[in-house]
Image (spheres, rainbow, N blue to C red):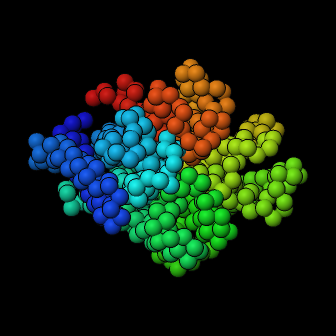
Amino acid sequence: MRIQVILRVIGILVMVFSLSLIPPIIVSLIYQDGALNAFISALGINLISGLLLWLPVRNQRADLKIRDGVVVTVLFWFVLGLSGSVPFLISTDPVLTFTDALFESISALTTTGATILTHIDNLPPSILFYRQQLQWLGGMGIIVLAVAIMPMLGIGGMQLYRAETPGPVKDSKLTPRIAETAKALWYIYASLTTVCAIGYWLAGMSLFDAICHSFSTVAIGGFSTHDASIGYFDSVAIEIVCSLFMFISAINFGLHFFAWRNQSVLHYFQDPEARFFIFILFCTITLATLGLTLTSTYDWDVSIRYAVFESISIATTAGFGTSDFSTWPHFLPFLLIVTSFAGGCASSTGGGMKVMRILLILKQGVREIQRLVHPSAVIPIKVGGKAIPERVVSAVWGFFSAYLIVYVILMIGLMATGIDQVTAWSAVAATLNNLGPGLGEVSANFASVNDPAKWMLCFAMLLGRLEVFTLLVLFTPMFWQR
């Protein structure tokens, strides 16, 4: 492992990230909201920090190996969380402790959307914009953005892409060169964001709200510029735009790439993961609508409206709200939280375990039942007519096991700090799945959670964003052996 090369990469990435503070500075100048000094100071601190890391090792040039890429990815998300928290720490509105500032920053960058802030409507516009922008940068992955410019810096980027890209199969590339892949993904990502912002604006949002919400919608982050989230606007048109782009962003971006390149949408309907994702949404919406109607919680039309929006929002792990689903009757809050475990499709901005993994686990379960009847039969698992290698199936089961074990350990850890069972269960689900809202004390925000629990939840958010193994592998002796 080449520490000097890793430090050079981290230094460059921190300096690049510091430039993301320029848009909030411009917003602060426009609105004269009093947060200008905080952002200018934060830009200077981050830029100098990155420079100090880079200067001593600036001449160290080499391609990153697998272990180097993993360390850079994990280190950068932690360092990025620290860098992102600087404006929150320096700002006088809101006034946050280090733990709260770090929690808000990591929550934004991992697109979790769990917030410790209250009275969001009264915060300076530049702070609001900055929170949304952090989610947008984290959505596709700041690492993928860096990979796009790494060839110019003399750094190979393939190992970073493999460590960062979510999904069960990480070696596939949309274009022959990794930099071209990253650029293509960001072109699509930026285009979706632009169209989403226009849609919000035409539906009735102000230009500021439209831009901010487009950031967190396409990133499937869930942060809003209002305490009441999307419910603040009380607009069916805005909810339709939000639902549409949450759904689009939860679909594999590889499918969007092929749609853009081949000028066709037929492959969306042919993709087994996309079809299974639609099936999950349909079942969830149907059950939620029936549950709300049969319990007389709302009328039919209102039940359908809330069921559609909340089901898509929670299932995609966006976490926007138009109604407080935690107060819904009977099994519905539990049902919605459970759907977030599936989350979005592989290679999307959604969280959770990914729909493809759930599909493979179900197919494996069906195969085991068939083997009881035909013990000697060779029954391959097929997705889209193609047999899945046993190595992939095994990896999915390993991921599933690790995910559940981590979930249980974190939940027990939260309960050990004095948090009740419902709050602990949903808080871990909300952070590990990069969802945001939970049940109990964390249904609205995480302000009441104690500091030790917040640190554990920060770890859960990073685990979810890096899909568990990328982070856990650092704790194995084998990883550090030469």
The residue drawn where x is 38% and y is 31% is 474
- Residue closest to the far bottom: 263
Along the viewing direction, whichever of 66 and 23 lies nearer the viewer: 23
- Residue 300 to residue 331: above or below: below
The residue drawn where x is 35% and y is 58% is 33
**Residue 455 visible somewhere in the drawing:** yes
Q: What x and y, as percent, mark residue 417? A: 54, 21
Q: What x and y, as percent, mark residue 368? A: 73, 38
Q: Is residue 432 left or right of residue 163?
A: right
Q: What x and y, as percent, mark residue 282? A: 75, 59
Q: Which quadrant is the C terminus positioned in?
A: top left
Q: Is residue 86 left or right of residue 314?
A: left
Along the viewing direction, whichever of 154 and 299 lies nearer the viewer: 299
Q: What x and y, as percent, mark residue 365? A: 72, 41
Q: Which quadrant is the N terminus positioned in?
A: top left
Q: Quadrant of residue 398?
A: top right
The residue drawn where x is 15% and y is 43% is 52
- Residue 297 to residue 98: above or below: below
- Residue closest to the far top: 416
How many numbered tags mark residues here? 0
Along the viewing direction, whichever of 28 and 386 lies nearer the viewer: 28
**Residue 252 visible somewhere in the drawing:** no
- Residue 292 to residue 300: above or below: above
The residue drawn where x is 64% and y is 51% is 314
- Residue 454 to residue 230: above or below: above
Q: Is residue 300 left or right of residue 249?
A: right
